[in-house]
Image (cartoon, rainbow, N blue to C red):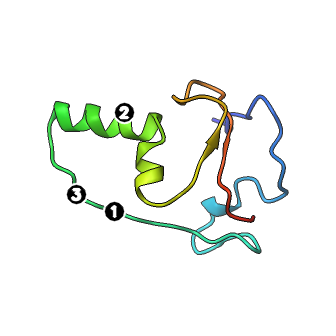
Amino acid sequence: MPPIEPPNPFTYADVGATRKPGFCPPDFHPLHVRTRIGEGEPVFRRASEAVLTWEMHRAMGVGIDATADRAPPRSMSRSPWPA
């Protein structure tokens, strides 16, 4: 099945490049963090809410400039970090 194309074009050339193991486009810096937060439906729902409301990003120090307080489908967000 072919990948789903976004409704709006991205603003950078290497779209999808990070799918290649070990590759990161020039001037981009990957951030991989794993933390066990618990288990069960209540924990899953709380974690989902933290991602959708940008709380998880802000708690990690990743500033977010978003068009909505909650991430609806096709919402736009950006990090203040230079690309």
Indicate the amino acid at tag 1: Arg
- Say whether disc 2 or disc 1 marks the residue closer to the N-terminus: 1
- Say whether disc 2 or disc 3 marks the residue closer to the N-terminus: 3
Q: Quadrant of residue 79?
A: bottom right
- Vertical comparison of 60 with 78: above or below: below
- Residue at position x 27%, y 31% from top? 45
Residue at disc 3, secondary structure:
loop
Mark 1–mark 3 distance (CA, rounded to whole Å) = 7 Å
Q: Which residue is mark 3?
A: 36
Q: Residue furthest top?
A: 72
Q: Is residue 56 left or right of residue 78?
A: left
Q: Which residue is mark 1?
A: 34
Report crowding for label 3: few under 14, some 14 to 19, many 20 or more residues within 10 A (C-alpha): few
Q: Quadrant of the N terminus?
A: top right
Q: Is residue 11 left or right of residue 74?
A: right
- Residue at position x 43%, y 40% from top? 51
- Asked if disc 1 and disc 3 are in contact, CB closer than 8 Å, the reply is yes
Q: Position of residue 59 (x, y in %)?
A: 40, 54
Residue at disc 1, secondary structure:
loop
Q: Which residue is mark 2?
A: 49
Q: Nearer the viewer, mark 2 or mark 1?
A: 2
Task: State the mark number for residue 56.
Answer: none
- Vertical comparison of 27 with 45: above or below: below
Q: Position of residue 72 (x, y in %)?
A: 56, 24
Residue at disc 2, secondary structure:
helix
